[in-house]
Amino acid sequence: MIGNVETLIVNNVEKKLSKPHYLLGVFYDGELEKAVMQFLDENGSRLVLIPDPVNHKPYFLSRESVDEIKSNKSIVNHEGFLDVLEVYK
């Protein structure tokens, strides 16, 4: 069992963990409306949760055209939908 769980509210991107930690995963916190990173300290005894300090926005990739996506009501009417951007590889 993991020992302590700590949450660091990070308002400044330059704040860092003081010792090496392992990134376990990232999940979305609906209350904070942010992604939260889960780190485990090098001893495996402390779990640290850090909310996204740069306000990353979720995204998805599609082979459909911008027009096809914009005409899909289930996508554009979703409460989390912001925009459609076309990118090229």
Image (cartoon, rainbow, N blue to C red):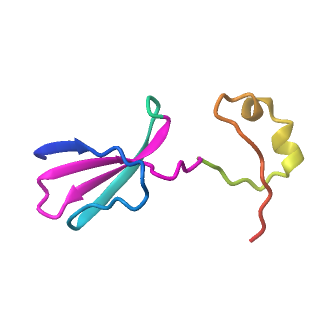
Residue 65 is a magenta residue: no
Residue at image location 27% in from the left, 61% down from the top: 17
Residue at image location 22% in from the left, 43% down from the top: 6
Side of 36 where 46 appears, left or right:
left
Residue at image location 71% in from the left, 39% down from the top: 82
Side of 29 where 60 appears, left or right:
right
Side of 71 where 59 appears, left or right:
left
Residue at image location 24% in from the left, 63% down from the top: 21
Q: Quadrant of residue 19?
A: bottom left
- Residue 46, x across and y down, in percent: 15, 51
Residue 49 is a magenta residue: yes
- Residue 39, x across and y down, in percent: 28, 55
Q: Quadrant of the C terminus?
A: bottom right
Q: Which residues are magenta?
A: 33-57
* Total numbered labels placed on residues in the image: 0
- Residue 13, x across and y down, in percent: 43, 58
Q: Quadrant of the N terminus?
A: top left
Is 42 rendered above or below residue 12? below
Of 33 and 14, the residue lying toward us: 14
Name the residue at the bottom extreme. 89
Of 79 and 32, the residue lying toward us: 32
Is 43 rendered above or below residue 34? below
Is 11 rendered above or below residue 76? below
Side of 75 where 46 appears, left or right:
left
- Residue 30, x across and y down, in percent: 47, 31
